[in-house]
Amino acid sequence: MNIRAKKIWTFLACAAGLGLLAGTAFSQEKFPDRPIQFIIPWAAGGGGTVNAQALQPHFEKAIQGSIQIVNKPGGGGTIAWNHVANAAPDGYTVGVTNQSFILTQYTTRTGVNFKKVDPIIMVIDMPAALAVKTDAPWKNFKEYISYAKANPGKVQMGNSGMGANYHVSALGIEMVTGVKLTHVPFKGAGPSITALLGGHVDSAVSELPSLLPYVEGKKFRLLVVGSPERNFAVPDVPIMKEEGYEQILIGAWYVWSVPKGVPKDRFQKLHDAFKAAMEAPEYRQLYRKLGGVARYMGPQELPAFYEQEDRKLKRLIDYSGFKPIE
């Protein structure tokens, strides 16, 4: 080996050694010794923030440290998700992801991809439901679908924005039933619910916790819920399968994820703290009141779950012909 080759090999060996030492030092440092950032892809006050706040005291107790909730709205969540994917893999940056995290790779050209992060844990699953006003002419899902089939395009469906979760859910209703709806986009699920309340659209799909107060206030009637079994909060409302259709409605699950490469001991410590937090009675009771289910799924199952959700969402995007927004 000539002198030049020896120098190159010496340099590479030193670099590798330094990398290993840095990784070992990362792992052996006390963790956490500063606040862990919870990155929320949406504005303060939304479901992501509520979930983080509900977990916070129990998570902090379990991990014996503090967290800082950071809202990074914009780009349909892409700003926050790219921030998490590109953050230092030291365990101090954790982001919440949901269906939109997977969906965004088909609706935008921002480089977001669910394979760029490592999922830690699923903590909550909130089913979607189809709502109409209580004075609507349709008393059940069959009547709604029959009318929509007889009057293509006449039924207006409010959604949370073109290409967003609940727009895709509405497309799913079209796909499995054969009806044609008129989709009316709004800037989020909240405005679409307000539009339904004001009679500006005929129906809307959203997560059950957002609709439940209006159901309890006799303002809305739910026609169908998108879950494997009837929801305890609205036990009289049928699920898609009972109506004879594939379960295609997309709700809102929350999975907490980190950049790839977080040391195993830190990853495990984050996982265990999240699991302890979601098992706290106060956390479970809060979401039970909202119709949500505290649903555990760990790092072994989540990659396959992401792949499954990816296939389902891509199928809906292909059906719609939706093209990515530049």
Image (cartoon, rainbow, N blue to C red):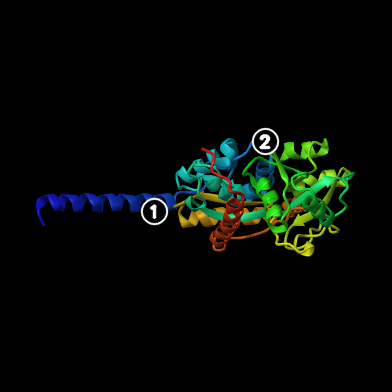
In the structure shown, which secondary structural element does the residue marked by tag 1 occupy? helix
Residue 183 lies, in percent from the top left, at 70, 42
**Near-viewer residue (239 or 279):** 239
In the picture of the structure, the residue carrying the numbered disc 1 is: 24
Q: Residue at image x 50%, y 49%?
A: 113
The amino acid on which the numbered mark 1 sits, given as a three-letter code, is Thr
Left or right of 97 in this view: 202:
right
Neighbor class of circle 2 (other Cα within 10 Å; few <14, some 14-19, many 20+) is: few
**Residue 290 shows in this picture:** no
First of labels 2, 1 by sequence position: 1
Q: Is residue 77 above or below residue 295?
A: above
In the picture of the structure, the residue carrying the numbered disc 2 is: 187
Q: CA distance from mark 2 to mark 1?
A: 46 Å
Residue 112 lies, in percent from the top left, at 50, 45
**Residue 283 shows in this picture:** yes
Left or right of 58 in this view: 65:
left
Q: Is residue 294 above or below residue 322?
A: below
